[in-house]
Amino acid sequence: MFVKGHGRNSIAMARRWFDKCEFGHHDCRRETSTSFSPTRLVKISGGRQRLVLSKSLNRPVQSATLSHCWGNIAIHRLLQDNISTFLQDIPADSLCRTFLDAIVIARPLGLHYLWIDSLCIVQDDPADWRRESAAMCDVYTHASLNIAATSARDGSEGCFMNKDNNYLAAHCIAIGQERFMCANSSLYAHNVLDTPLGSRAWVVQERLLAARTIHFGKNQLFWTCQDRIACEAYPERLPGGLVREVDHPSLETEASWREVVAQYSGCELTQSSDKLVAISGLAKRVAQYRPEDQYVAGLWFESLHVDLCWKVGRPEPLPPPPGPYQAPSWSWAALNQRVIFPAEPSSNWAPLMTALQVQTDRVGDDLYGALENAALWVKSGFFLKTRIPKRSQDAKAQRFGESSVSMVIAWDYVSDGTSEFYFCPVLQDVTRSQTQGFVLVATLGEAGEYRRVGHFKEVVEGWPYERLDIVDARVGECLECEPQPGDYVDGFEKGGVDLPGVIKLV
Ligand SMILES: [Zn+2]
């Protein structure tokens, strides 16, 4: 097969990295050596390719996976009526450039089997798709290598780009007797994350689950494994500081899940119903590090106080209200927006809310997959009801009356005409007396049932208040707000407002 541009050099570089990892890195080898085999694989040895069923093989085999953008071109797909043909032969001329390049890359590494989603999952069989998407954690975790067509916008562009040699040399300067290495501090993020592939939601888990990935970037190759991240300019290892923890989270810490979500939520998803499915493999992996914990609609029960305090990150303009159900309103997965977590846990943060119980109705059998419904019952120490009759669009930020108290709201989406809101504090910074939590509205369902519409943070001491300002975080404008006596409810029992002690969030 034809190898474009600098393909031969790239394959030689890939082989050096792969061999060093395979024979020298104990942790990487342990991850990939397993008895797990995907249901189907494409056999690529012997000069042709065909689909094989793993159960027909006598033993587990080493395989490579492919991370790629489907793009808008039609690619050859496994369907119910071509399975028998695929098991005989998949002609090379029916495969797109990226698939052919993946074969060219895998063969010299001694990898005779390839897993590609469009060829190994029956694309017109929803049951097969649900079953196989639930197995992605194992498919990517235990593959010997993940080949990432990082710069290709679709299957026609292939893995090998016309590289610029200027990018391949590490730049040094000498000042007097000292030599300094000059490097772009966002080298990894620029080449791996800010790319056509890096913008795809499904690829976040492919990248983070794979024990080894080789990224075919626009300017150079990047290698990531358990032991190191390297690139052609720094073939041994990227110097410290060129990869941030948030760019490549380790998955083992509690905070790393929020880093994953912040990254994932900003990526594009063709089917919004896949919101929880396309990250389910990562959730399954994280569950191994949190065996006592419970995964609930994209959050973790043991860290719920912090996980619930997400907010939409700088939307311009605010998105419309959510469409078809993806997740409960208290989960970031309900929206198709980049979210951030303003609070990271420290000894200064004290919970002001107790999560009592969660109930989820799943679409399939996967504990980490899509949901039909979910509800969370919480008890909060305080609860504030107030009216915001007008969410103004053009006023500048200003103080409200003579109050010295401000409430900064980040709405989840544009107003749907609701004017009565409830503020449920979740966390308090005890050293700075700052509180944050979510803004709720009552649903039209049963009494005591609410849904989330925003995140708030109050910026002065004390709760509850006699007066407050409410400031729209998006445009810094002040919203008209007139709390009435009795709207501040301490412990739900006081204040004369008819609210239950426990609320249900949907
Ligand atoms: Zn390694």
Image (tube, rainbow, N blue to C red):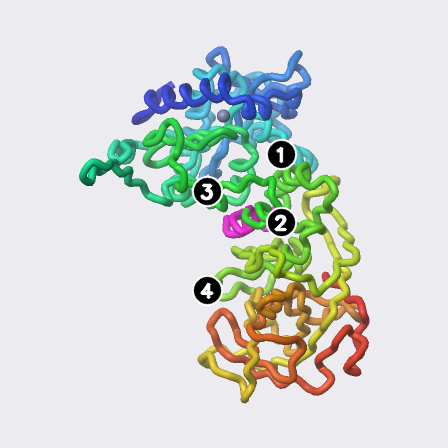
Disc 2 or 1, which lies upstream in sequence?
1
Q: Which of the two discs, 4 and 1, labels the residue nearer the N terminus?
A: 1
* Circle 4 or circle 1, nearest the eye: 1
Q: Secondary structure at mark 4?
A: loop
The reply to whether residue 379 is in sight is yes
Mark 2 and mark 1: Cα distance apart in space: 19 Å
Name the residue type under label 3: Gly
Q: Secondary structure at mark 3?
A: loop
For the residue marked with disc 1, what is the amino acid?
Answer: Cys
Tell me the kind of residue under disc 4.
Glu
Q: Is residue 262 magenta?
A: yes
Badge 4 is on which residue?
Answer: 316
Q: Amino acid at mark 2?
A: Ser
Label 2 vs 3, first from the N-terminus? 3
Q: Nearer the viewer, mark 2 or mark 1?
A: 1
Q: Give the number of the disc on residue 137.
A: 1
Separation of marks 1 and 3 at Cα, in angstroms: 18 Å
Residue at the spot of label 2: 273
Left or right, residue 69 beside residue 320: left
Secondary element under disc 2, as helix, strand or loop, is: helix
Among numbered discs 3 and 4, the one appearing first in the sequence: 3
| Dot 1: element | helix
Disc 2 packing (10 Å; few <14; some 14–19; many ≥20): some
Q: CA distance from mark 4 to mark 1?
A: 34 Å
Name the residue located 74 percent from the left edge and 77 percent from the top edge. 489
Inter-mark Cα distance, 3 to 4 = 22 Å
Q: Which residues are magenta?
A: 260-275
Task: Name the spot of residue 386 as percent of width and height, x first.
Answer: 66, 80
